[in-house]
Amino acid sequence: MSTPQILLALLAERPKHGYELKREHDERLPGAKPLPYGQVYSTLQRLGRDGLVAVSEVNRDGGPERTLYELTPKGTERLRAWLAETEPPLPHITGALFSRVVMALLLGGDARAVLDRQRAAHLERMRELTRAKTATETPAAEALAADYVLFHLDADLRWMELAAHRLTDLTKEISR
């Protein structure tokens, strides 16, 4: 996730304070890891240092000080450049599941059991997401986020099926 760019995008609408940015991040990106307040403020500090955001106003309406941040022209330019970029496909296998299966084979463990447990966990998560996204009144952003995760879980399940078929060959290669 690109927290600086996401905060720039949220500021493109109008000036906002850190609390509002955190709340909007968590609401508009359902299913994403909630953004810690400390990360919001440290990111805003770096964006300010780099000239991408500026303080537009400081309010003290009887409560804690609230600093409103706004996008600068340089920030708008950076945001547009980020939106125009293409996300490169991952060049390496980074999945913990792949590593766990290979290490189970390497150590003489039961890789099939690893795959079976993971398959059951994936299927349960898919059922939860399907129920959540088909519930009445599910916001479109939540349904879209659920679809994103469901497609990735489905790809993992297909990989697990293939891995299960290749366990004999993998075991032979590792034992050499």
Image (cartoon, helix red, strand yellow):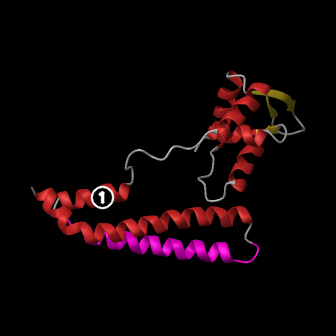
Query: Which part of the image, by quadrant, shows the C terminus?
Result: bottom left
What is the x, y in percent for residue 98?
A: 33, 57
The residue wearing badge 1 is 100
What is the x, y in percent for residue 37?
A: 66, 42
**Amino acid type, label 1:** Arg
Q: Which residues are magenta?
A: 109-137
Q: Residues within 10 Å of mark 1 (few under 14, many from 20)?
A: some
Tag 1's secondary structure? helix
| Nearer-the-camera pick, 32 or 87 | 87
What is the x, y in percent for residue 55?
A: 80, 27
Image position of 131 (left or right of 100): right
Residue visible at 81% across and 37% down in the picture: 64
Q: Is residue 20 magenta?
A: no
Picture layout, residue 101 above or below residue 13: below
Image position of 111 (left or right of 36): left
| Nearer-the-camera pick, 23 or 73 | 73
Furthest-left residue in view?
176
Picture layout, residue 1 above or below residue 67: below
Across the whole image, how many numbered discs are drawn on residues? 1
The answer to which quarter of the image holds residue 77 is: top right
The answer to which quarter of the image holds residue 66 is: top right
